[in-house]
Image (spheres, rainbow, N blue to C red):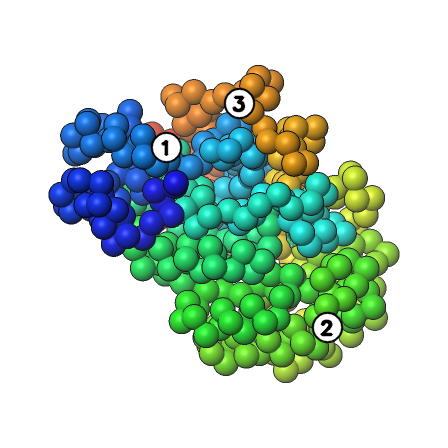
Amino acid sequence: MILLDFTKSELINWVESVGFPKFRGSQLYDALINGKDENSKTNLPKDILIKVSELGIMQPIKIVQIQESKKEHNVKFLYKLNDGHLIEGMLMQYKFGNTLCVSTQVGCKMNCAFCASGLNGWLRNLSSGEILGQIVAVNSWLGGTAKERKITNVVLMGMGEPLDNYDNVVKFLKCATKESFEFSCRNISLSTCGITPKIEKLADEGLPVTLCISLHAPNDSIRKTIIPIARNYSIHAVLEAAKYYYTMTNRRIIIEYTVIKGVNDSFANAKELSELLANLPCHVNVIKLNEVKERGLKAPTQDACQQFVNTLNRFGISATTRRTLGDDIDGACGQLRNKVATNAEGGEKLSVASYKEVKQPKKSIKTNKVSDKNKKYFDKNKKSNTISKRHGGVSESKSNKNPKQRLHRQGR
Ligand code: SF4
């Protein structure tokens, strides 16, 4: 039993049912969302902490490996779940704050042609607490608390198709927005490859998160070669569902278009896409393919991506290129996890022993490592005065020499 699967009121009732006063439930909830476990200092008596840790899992996500980008200010995480399975996520720094990309499934059934997550199939869904637990783990890693969180935005774009794990994802969205971290729905984006009935269902939930549609093609014949689920749901049906989502939420739709050399990158493709999207309030994120060795697809040049954007703009479609993030840190979703787990999964659960080769981060190291790196980064940029361009005008005062604090300030 994962305690973060409970809503706050469910947890309070559970605590009462195992013999403790209700107010202890509220304290336990605060402890859980602040990343505490039975070994942490909290305002709960030790005997209660020990008892609840015997009855349920306090923290379902453990960070077991960290990769830092040398080119960008991004960090990739490999997490271990309580049953030994591996998932991954990425922390990205933008000028508006820190965005965490979270996973919703172990593996993925969708098997999109450019993605590493579907290579070994689907193993299981994540529970709502395991999705929330990724935020808890990284927020704590950054030194944040639930009240003063260091993660400003969450994107459900990691391993898995969120709408294929609908109930757990919706429960997570409710917990993340209405309690725990109290994110605004505006600060959460959900990406789907286009399961139309679930898009319509989500539109009726009263949770107006930003909907991102992984379209990647201007017509069904190309799309079917990239996204197998396109055989079940036509582009027309997906865009009708997107329109319905817009009508119900008043949120502009984000169209994701990964440009693949020789597959969907021509002028004709851009023109056809602009005609397709003419009546949808949307913005197109054009993404240069993050190459996955096993998939064999090639990325076009950055110039070719920009030309694709220019063509869309010329035909009246709002579009920009999105940076390809973390291509030096197994940035494509599923790559890091596959590298570590290739031989260990596929039905067989990873045991802790399987981690002998995985560097186990020590608490002091895992925080300081990034801080030191940031320190160099900030110091360098302070001299060249480019920090204001790259990080939204955050200027560094001499009194704030702690790189960790700088990172936090960016995130707020
Ligand atoms: S792109 Fe998303 S939906 Fe497609 S295989 Fe990867 S994780 Fe699954």
Amino acid type, residue under disc 1 in the picture = Lys
The residue that mark 3 highlights is 352
* Observer-nearest of 196 and 349: 349
What distance separates the C-alpha of mark 3 from that of mark 1? 31 Å
Could you classify mark 2 by the number of other residues whose Cα lies within 10 Å: few (under 14), some (14-19), or many (20 or more)?
some
For label 2, the residue is: 234
Residue drawn at (52%, 76%) of the image: 246
Under mark 2, the amino acid is Ser
Assign the N terminus to one quadrant of the image.
Answer: top left
Labels 3 & 2 near each other (Cβ < 8 A): no
10 Å crowding of disc 3: few (<14), some (14-19), many (20+): few
* Secondary structure state at the residue bearing disc 3: helix
Residue 170 percent across, percent down from the top left: 45, 60
Type of amino acid at the residue the image marks with label 3? Val
Q: Is residue 171 above or below residue 137?
A: below
Q: Please indicate, yes or no, whether residue 29 appears anywhere in the rendered image.
A: yes
Q: Position of residue 167 (x, y in %)?
A: 47, 59
Mark found first going from the N terminus, 1 or 2: 2
Q: Is residue 68 left or right of residue 19?
A: right
Q: Earlier in the sequence, mark 3 or mark 1?
A: 3
The disc placed on residue 344 is none
Say whether marks 3 and 1 touch (CB < 8 Å). no
Q: Which mark is drawn over residue 404?
A: 1
Q: CA distance from mark 1 to mark 2?
A: 47 Å
Q: Residue at x 59, y 28 (%)?
A: 350
